[in-house]
Amino acid sequence: MATSDSATSAAQTIPVRDWRSSARGKNMQQLQQLRWIAIAGQLLAILVVHAGMGIALPLWPMLLVLAALCLVNLLGPLYWRHLHKVRLRHLLFSLLADVAALTALLHLAGGITNPFVFLYLLQVVLAAILLPLKARWLVVAVTSLCLLWLAVTPSPVRLPANLDAGLADRYVQGLLVCFVLMAALLVIFMGRIGEILRARDARLAALRQRAIEEEHIVRMGLLATGAAHELGTPLATMAVILGDWQHLPHFTSDPELLNDVTEMQAQVLRCKAIVRGILQSAGEPRGEAPHPTDLHAYIESLADHWRQRTQAPLALHNHIRPGIGIVADDGIRQMLFNVLDNAQEASPGQVRLHAQLDDDALMLIVEDDGPGFADAILDRLGTPYLSSKDAPGRGLGLFLSVNVARTLGGSIQAENRREGGARVRIRIPVQALATGTTGEEDLA
């Protein structure tokens, strides 16, 4: 029951995604801004034509249409916030609402003879960029029917036109204003929407690259588990033989040989433990699960475990206050140990680990006094088989660590210190450690 309650509370702490964070949400924001500009421009045009040009317009019906557009702009975000996302049909309905409002205003202000009738093209261009093929043609059909309706339906207002007067004619002036307005809006908003779409494409490319890397990790896991199964039998045989050797007179009479055999048996047992750990991580029951612990104590235990495993010095500077609860997971330990192992191999002196909190994120900073990273490695940090050590199969530790950190919603950055050596910064959101959530988002 306690496990169920903790899982429920953890699920309740997962942050709800904002509808404005997706590409469609950002496009909808652009449409809302465009609608506010259209409402303000249409209101200004109504006042100028009615009061400045002396053309009597049906003010109350036209103001009612503008009020309906304002209502759509105000109520829309509340609905999308409830759904937590914007769908394609919402973009379609939004464009159709603008087409309907434009049709009503044009009918009340001259119909097909109104120079602002060309604003229909703006809706068609927006549909061509934001909507799939069928929805685009639907907008084209709706705008064409609206134009046809304006052409056959008499307007309550007749606009005077005298094209021979050139720029002095009100219709020509309206055409020029309509053209400048459409050109400006297309440049501004099409540029913004293009940036949103390019950002989405870049994110898709990053996700594809990540899928390739994760597929590579799966292949490595299959190879590791297969090798672990194959190594189990010879390691068990070696452990039995070394155990028998310890009781032979030839070895018991020579303390030096006996110590060598004892040390060999200890190393074989350690290899068997490593193989068993690989098999357990691959899905076999391990008898232990991620458990709640204190972040300060967890960092201390990781440092002690690494010292015992490598027999190497490690200076720990733990600046995290006690009392911050997290869920300990083996992936965090392996990620940190990979970075520490690389630092210990590269550094002839002591490795330093700094642990601190930075804006609700755990910062683990590993420093060494080695030669530092090559520029090619810094530019492609986390690429598999990219290592300063000229040996096949190297560079996988940092590659796996980068992927573990990214899965937890964090990141790993590396740099060379001015005084010599390298510095690796691991940043993990504390919420991911507390609830087990990730920083991944879908593209819906």
Image (cartoon, helix red, strand yellow):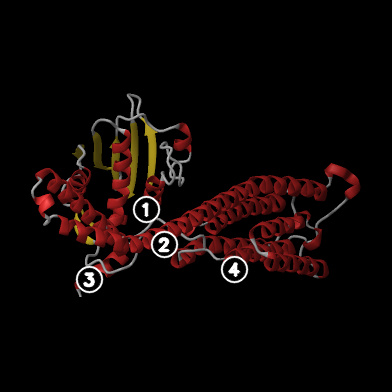
Position above or below: 1 against 87? below
Tell me the amino acid under the disc marked 1: Val
Tell me the amino acid under the disc marked 2: Leu
For the residue pair 86 and 285, the one nearer the viewer reads as 285
Label whose residue precedes the other's in the sequence (3 or 2): 3
Give me the C-alpha separation between circle 1 and circle 3: 25 Å
Give me the C-alpha separation between circle 2 and circle 4: 43 Å
Tell me the amino acid under the disc marked 4: Arg
Can residue 282 be spotted in the picture?
Answer: yes
The percent position of residue 201, horizontal first and vertical second, equals: 58, 52
Which residue in the structure is indicated by mark 4? 89
Q: Nearer the viewer, mark 1 or mark 2?
A: 2
Q: Nearer the viewer, mark 1 or mark 3?
A: 1
Q: Nearer the viewer, mark 3 or mark 2?
A: 2
* Residue 17 in the figure: left or right of residue 106: left
Secondary-structure class at tag 1? helix
Position above or below: 89 against 215? below
For the residue pair 41 and 315, the one nearer the viewer reads as 315
Give me the C-alpha separation between circle 1 and circle 2: 18 Å
The percent position of residue 273, horizontal first and vertical second, equals: 24, 58
Mark identifier at residue 222: 2
Q: Are marks 1 and 2 in contact (CB under 8 Å)?
A: no
For the residue pair 144 and 413, the one nearer the viewer reads as 413
Which residue in the structure is indicated by mark 3? 3
Can residue 17 be spotted in the picture?
Answer: no
Label whose residue precedes the other's in the sequence (1 or 4): 4
Label whose residue precedes the other's in the sequence (1 or 2): 2
The percent position of residue 429, horizontal first and vertical second, equals: 32, 51
Secondary-structure class at tag 3? helix
Which residue in the structure is indicated by mark 1? 404
Residue sitting at the far bottom:
1
